Amino acid sequence: MMRIKSTLILALTKLKTRRVRLTISVVISGLLLSLLAAASLISSGVFSSLSTFSSDGFGNRFIVSGVTSHEDYNITYSQSIIDRASAIQKQIIAQKKAYAARVGITYDPNTERAPYVDAYNATNSVKQVNNLSIGGAQALSEYSASNPIPGLKNMKNELKSFNPIGYFQMRALGPRSIFSANSTQPYLQVLKSGQESFQATGTNLSSTQTATEMFNATWALASKDLMKPFLLPGATTELGVDKSMPIIAPYTAVEQFLGLPPLSKNATSNQKLDRIKFVRSKAQTITFSVCYRNASSAKELTDVITQQQEIKQNKNNKDYQKPEYIKDVPTTACGSPPVIRDVRTPEDVADANKNIIFNQNFGEQVPAATILNFKVVGISADTSNGGFDLTQILSSLLASSISGRTNMLWFSPIETSEKMPVYKEIFGDLSIPAASDFYFAELRSAADEKAVLAAGDCISKISNNPNTDPNGSGIKKCEAEGKSFILSPYGSSSYALSGPKKTFSKFFGYASELFIVLSALIMLGTVGKIISDSRRETAVFRAIGAKRSDVAQIYLTYVFFLAILIFMFAILVGGGIAIYVQSQYASSFTVSALIAFNSTDLNKQFSLFGFSLKGVLSILVIAVSGAIASAIIPLISNLRRSPMKDMRDEN
Amino acid sequence: MDLNKAEEFLNLYSNDLKSAIQALETVYLLKNPEKKRKQKTGPTVVELVDITKKYKIGNQHIEALKGVSLTIGQGEFVAITGSSGSGKSTLLQIIGGLDKPTSGKIIVDEKDISRLSDRQLSDFRNKTIGFVFQFFYLQPFLDLKTNIQVPAMFTRKKLSETNERAVALAGEVGLSDRIKHLPKELSGGQMQRGAIARALINNPKVLLADEPTGNLDSANGKLIIELFEKIRKRFNTTIIIVTHDSKVAAMADREITLADGALKQ
């Protein structure tokens, strides 16, 4: 081994040779590495900021959410249920025929939907129960009754060994069972200026719908404990003095209630921040009403609108005969559609009334509508107000907002729901578990949360192929093992962050390996060439007494210095990139994060630039590894050559 | 008073006078090689016994050395001559431990170097041998003093330990005023003198020079040969040079001529 000082002298003098090639090498490798450096610096800032922001909301509470897949859609292919559906259908049709004959009305059994349909699964044609048919719906209902959905009781039982410190529940709007017919879904519409709108009566979610239009599908009842961290300062989950139901509303809906037009996409971060401050300060003054119509009322209204459209389309059609019985859209909020024309004969009226009684006897509801009053007590995160939309990304990434992975946006306290009229009709019996239920268990630590998630992961791993598992036996097996729920992290920022962090580390690892290979290849053409071109010098060193190890020491020290230069270049350029990204996007991220995390401290800043010693050292290690990898082959080759031959060849 | 002045004069110009006398002697010997005085040599320092060296290039077998045997004494100045491809450089490499003979024995400074490992050979080259090359091979971005110190760096000696010797050697080769200069600031002759100083830093017993004047003009070539003479006298170093130049060879104590890999009788 040579002395360090001697090695440094001989290695550093090499850095002065072939400067153009050296500069190219440093710049190309440095640029490549600077991307990793920038990624490291930015990610470090992002993760640090996410930790800071996620201390709001659920902060460092360790909560897991569970949903069940008990009602496996595969069982709709079950032959026994298909047979049962056919038998019920036959029986009800017979009853309907007899009843119709008795009261003297016409009943055509062909108008009934078939109890099963032909479906295609992969390559096979298979029979599938039709849940919209009277027989299919009842057969599936019987099946559900005899196979109750696992509920909170099951979750408590399954997780008792982990000693959770609390359990919570959330029931989302939607069918109680995944087999429920669509027509039984309730209709809820947020009133605008006390009026119903008859434009959007559909129930389908679409990206163009506003948050208020999405109320129909995104309202949930949640435990007060889940709501508390998201309440506005001074707000409570108690009923209002006017008996209004407290509700956490999505940010954009609050903007809408306040009559604020969406900010333009070019709005500055300061404008966005001012908007957030204003929205938060005024949100608690908002009260609003929602019209609830039961399925029958909703159908009645749809029929009215369809009829009106038909009349309008035929306005100039002389051959068109106006219906004898016409209803108009309601003139009062949530009212019944008034009759505006009735020229039916008394016999037709009697028949119509008999038909109504007939349908109600066979399960059709009496149309009913109610107005529900709400007061805003909190804000949930939804799409940001224009510009770079990160709010949802942040929310879904971390699942630490109240919405988590539930896709719900509006939340009212489950404990107060009984005081709300028709709550049972809207949400069903809360004591009977439903397919739209979410259950939550709060653990004591991240380790407990991790253990619960690891132990409970069964359903998500099973094969759910209807061809191979028509009776959902995979799910039944998981349930038999005491793993009835698909569990996921909820609200635990540390745990939620660990996923993206792990993914990033994995990405960084792969990227590092790729970089080492790429930089080694690039440097093989530059550094490697410099070394292989130094055969004569190596030969001279060997001739004047250098051991092979001495020469290796000199060149490895040289590539180490080269790697330091590349590293410094990469950190400078990468730092520059990170600073640029910070200057361009930090304020936009700050605004998005303030909404996503429902921050009470609006002075928090989201930084896209952070220093991580581990990250910086990783860059150094990658630079050194790449440089050494590029040098090692030409170096070994040089050392194995005959010194005298190399001196001659060079001449 | 006159004596004092004479003493002062001699002290001032003694080095120049010595150099002048040496130069005159060299010129005389070059013009009258038959008058060359054989140097009295010491004990054997290099002994080659029946050395052969065979190469294989592609399918062609080349016998570079064919049973070469010779001895060279301590302090002897030997010139190896011969036409291109005669094996003279191969012989120099084998003496210097840069190559191993196919057969035969080679003893340098009482060591059978054909039996040394690569590591031992490096150590041998570093301490026993000094190499001088036709193209000098100085480190372009190191000053002359540091260049002279390079072989000492491979001995784990501290740089401070060799500073004084490097400066002294620079003086010996007449480059005292150039020690801070980079090679590009030196002439060809100066660079070769610097390379000779570098070869002497570890006080080797044998100095091997491969065409040391091949890249110099005749004036500088003469100076280099004079320097070898001086070194031999000053340090009793054995000097073996490979040369094409018959005038240079004539300056040596002995001229060994190789023809087709064998010693020419």
Image: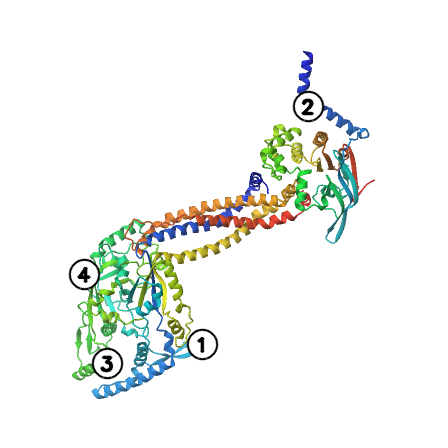
Q: Which one is in front, A390 or A140? A: A140
Image coordinates for residue A96, horizontal then vertical, percent: 26, 85
| Numbered disc in front, either 1 or 2 | 2
Identify the element where label 1 is drawn. Answer: loop
Q: Disc 4 designates what residue?
A: A240
Q: Disc 1 designates what residue?
A: A123
**For the residues tagged 1 and 2, is the chain the same?**
no
Q: Which amino acid is tagged 3?
A: Asn
Q: Disc 3 designates what residue?
A: A359
| Quadrant of the rendering where the C terminus of chain B is positioned | top right
Q: Which one is in front, B187 or B171? A: B171
Q: Disc 2 designates what residue?
A: B15
**For the residues tagged 2 and 3, is the chain the same?**
no
Precedes in sequence: disc 3 or disc 4: 4
Image coordinates for residue B90, horizontal then vertical, percent: 73, 43
Cα separation, mark 2 vs mark 3, equals 134 Å
The chain under label 1 reads: A
Judge from the rendering whether residue A538 lies leftward or rightward of residue A190; answer left or right: right
The chain under label 4 reads: A
Q: Which amino acid is tagged 1?
A: Thr
Identify the element where label 3 is drawn. Answer: helix
Identify the element where label 4 is drawn. Answer: loop
Cα separation, mark 3 vs mark 4, equals 40 Å
Any part of residue B138 in sight: no
